[in-house]
């Protein structure tokens, strides 16, 4: 299971890398679906342009452990074979990857639902702070934003 919080300058793992890792799992024989998600930095919102985004967490180890717990719970709930998640922290610009999630399961229904719940729980339950540097100034968005 590859579930990690990484500094964006530490290691560059792509969605294709995660899919490749999932396909090497001994459990792939029981899978009929792989769903993936790549959350990226949006450069435009309503009335502002985002020039830069800084994503932090006060305690990487604690957040990492909470991420693993969330993914273990989702995996058990939906009975999927594998879930891989990479959440980056650091400084980002338009189009940069922030969150990668790949789920492999027997059927598309539970696999899709496991992907959706993984994304939502990461967004709303983990202690991240986003600082948006925009043409209108700086905005701070805490977990769930």
Image: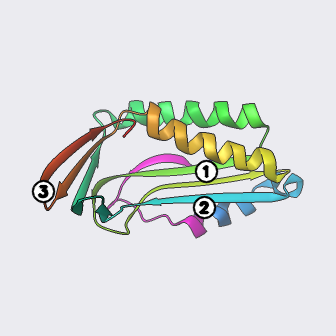
Q: In front of the other: label 2 or label 3?
A: 3
Q: Is residue 109 above or below residue 10?
A: above
Could you tell me which residue is drawn at 28 percent across and 66 percent down? 93
Could you tell me which residue is drawn at 71 percent across and 50 percent down? 112
Q: Image quadrant for the C terminus?
A: top left
Asked if residue 7 is among those painted magenta in the image, a careful observer would answer yes
In this view of the protein, can residue 81 be seen by the observer?
A: no
Q: Is residue 63 left or right of residue 115?
A: left
Residue 2 coordinates in the image, percent (x, y): 58, 50
Tag 3 residue:
136
Dot 2: element: helix
Q: Earlier in the sequence, mark 1 or mark 2?
A: 2
Residue 8 coordinates in the image, percent (x, y): 34, 59
Q: Nearer the viewer, residue 93 or 57?
A: 93
Which label belongs to residue 84?
A: 1
Q: Which residues are magenta?
A: 3-17
Q: In front of the other: label 1 or label 3?
A: 3
Q: Residue at the right extreme?
A: 30
Dot 1: element: strand
Q: Earlier in the sequence, mark 1 or mark 3?
A: 1
Q: Is residue 142 left or right of residue 100?
A: left
Asked if residue 114 is among those painted magenta in the image, a careful observer would answer no
Q: Could you say which quadrant of the image residue 61 lies in?
A: top left
Tag 2 residue:
18
- Marks 1 and 2 close (CB-CB < 8 Å): yes
- How far apart are the alpha carbons under marks 1 and 2? 7 Å
Residue 97 coordinates in the image, percent (x, y): 42, 62
Q: Is residue 102 above or below residue 3?
A: below
């Amino acid at each position: 299971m590859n579930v990690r919080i990484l500094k964006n300058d530490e290691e560059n793992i792509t969605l294709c890398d995660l899919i490749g890792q999932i396909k090497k799992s001994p459990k792939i024989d029981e899978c009929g679906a792989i769903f993936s998600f790549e959350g990226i930095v949006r450069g435009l919102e309503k009335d502002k342009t985002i020039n830069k985004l800084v994503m932090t967490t006060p305690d990487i180890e604690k957040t990492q452990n909470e991420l693993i717990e969330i993914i273990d719970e989702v995996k058990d709930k939906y009975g999927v074979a594998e879930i891989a998640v990479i959440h980056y922290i650091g400084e980002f610009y338009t189009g940069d990857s922030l969150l990668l999630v790949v789920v492999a399961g027997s059927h598309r229904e539970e696999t899709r639902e496991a992907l959706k719940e993984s994304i939502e729980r990461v967004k709303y339950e983990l202690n991240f702070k986003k600082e948006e540097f925009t043409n209108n100034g700086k905005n701070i968005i805490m977990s769930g934003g």
